[in-house]
Image (cartoon, rainbow, N blue to C red):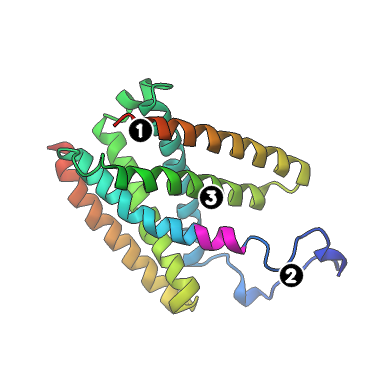
C-alpha cells in the first residue's frame, strides 16, 4: 500500500529500465573516479601524498582516468543539451547515448597512442 | 503541503545546478588541454591559465557532485550537514594546496 504523503510518478516517466538509467549510473561511477583522482592528484603534486604521483605514472591507470574523464565529459555535455536544448525524449536519449559511447571510444583510441608509445 | 516541509524553496539549489553545468563545460576544455599536453611536453598543460580554472572549477565540480550523491542517498539531515561540513573542509584544504602548486610554477 503506497504511503499517501509521498509524491509518486506514473510508471511511463519512470527512470528505470531506460538508457538514461545506464548513462546516469556510469556518470556517477566515472565522476567518483575522476573526483578521487583530482583530490589525490592535488595532494600528490603538493607533496602531501607523493606515492600517488608514481601510482598514476602507470599507463593502465592513465587509460582508466582518460576513459572515466572522456565518458564523463561527453555524457555531461549530453546532460547540458538535455537541460537546455534537445529535451528528454526517449528516442533522442538513446541516440545521444550512442554518440557519447562512440566519441568516448574515439578519444580513448587517440589518447592511448601517446600514453603507450 | 506536509510532504514538502523542510525541503527548501522551489529555487534552492538552482545556482549550484547552473554552476555545475558551467564548470563542467569549462573543465572539458582545460582538462583535455592539460591531459594531452602533459603526455607530450607539458608546456601548455602547466600554464596558469589552464591550471587555475582546472583546480578552481575542478574542486567545486567534484565536491558539488559528491554533495549531489550525498543528497540522493543520505536521508538524515544531521548526517547531510556533517558530510557537507567535511566537504567544505576538504575543499578549502585542496584549494590552499592547489594554490601552492600553481604559485610554485
Give the label, 2 or 1, closer to the camera: 1
- Could one spot residue A2 in this view of the protein? no
Pointers 2 and 1 within a single chain: no
Q: Secondary structure at mark 2?
A: loop
Which residue is identified by label 1? B103
Chain hosting mark 1: B
Task: Describe residue B26's horizontal placement relative to residue A14 as left or right.
Answer: left
Q: CA distance from mark 3 to mark 2?
A: 25 Å
Magenta range is B14-19
Query: Which quadrant is the C terminus of chain A positioned in?
Result: top left
Q: Are marks 3 and 2 in contact (CB under 8 Å)?
A: no
Identify which residue is drawn at 61% across, 75% down: A13
Q: Could you classify mark 3 by the number of other residues whose Cα lies within 10 Å: few (under 14), some (14-19), or many (20 or more)?
A: some
Q: Nearer the viewer, residue B9 or A2?
A: B9
Q: Indicate which disc residue B65 carries.
A: 3
Q: Nearer the viewer, residue A110 or A83?
A: A83
Give the label, 3 or 1, closer to the camera: 1
Residue B90, by quadrant, is top right
Residue B81, by quadrant, is top right
Residue A45 rendering spot, x and y as whole percentages:
36, 28
Q: Earlier in the sequence, mark 3 or mark 1?
A: 3
Chain hosting mark 3: B
Q: CA distance from mark 3 to mark 1?
A: 27 Å
Pointers 3 and 1 within a single chain: yes
Task: Describe residue B32's horizontal placement relative to residue A33 as left or right.
Answer: left
Q: Secondary structure at mark 3?
A: helix
Give the label, 3 or 2, closer to the camera: 3
Residue A28 rendering spot, x and y as whole percentages:
50, 51
Give the residue furthest to the front: B103
Query: Which quadrant is the N terminus of chain A positioned in?
Result: bottom right
Magenta-colored segment: predominant secondary structure: helix
Q: Indicate which disc residue A8 carries.
A: 2
Amino acid at each position: 500500500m503506497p504511503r499517501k504523503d509521498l509524491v509518486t510518478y506514473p510508471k511511463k516517466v519512470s527512470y528505470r529500465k531506460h538508457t538514461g538509467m545506464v548513462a546516469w549510473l556510469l556518470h556517477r561511477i566515472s565522476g567518483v573516479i575522476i573526483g578521487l583522482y583530482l583530490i589525490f592528484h592535488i595532494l600528490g603534486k603538493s607533496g602531501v601524498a607523493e606515492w600517488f604521483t608514481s601510482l598514476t605514472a602507470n599507463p593502465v591507470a592513465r587509460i582508466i582516468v582518460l576513459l572515466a574523464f572522456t565518458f564523463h565529459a561527453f555524457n555531461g555535455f549530453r546532460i547540458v543539451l538535455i537541460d537546455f536544448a534537445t529535451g528528454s525524449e526517449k528516442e533522442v536519449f538513446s541516440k545521444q547515448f550512442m554518440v557519447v559511447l562512440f566519441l568516448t571510444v574515439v578519444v580513448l583510441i587517440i589518447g592511448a597512442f601517446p600514453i603507450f608509445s | 503541503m506536509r510532504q514538502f516541509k523542510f525541503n527548501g524553496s522551489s529555487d534552492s539549489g538552482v545556482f549550484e545546478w547552473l554552476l555545475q553545468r558551467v564548470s563542467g563545460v569549462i573543465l572539458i576544455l582545460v582538462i583535455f588541454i592539460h591531459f594531452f599536453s602533459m603526455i607530450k611536453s607539458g608546456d601548455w598543460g602547466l600554464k596558469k591559465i589552464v591550471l587555475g580554472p582546472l583546480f578552481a572549477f575542478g574542486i567545486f565540480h567534484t565536491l558539488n557532485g559528491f554533495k549531489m550523491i550525498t543528497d540522493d542517498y543520505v536521508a538524515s539531515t544531521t548526517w547531510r550537514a556533517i558530510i557537507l561540513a567535511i566537504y567544505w573542509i576538504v575543499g578549502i584544504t585542496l584549494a590552499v594546496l592547489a594554490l601552492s602548486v600553481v604559485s610554485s610554477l
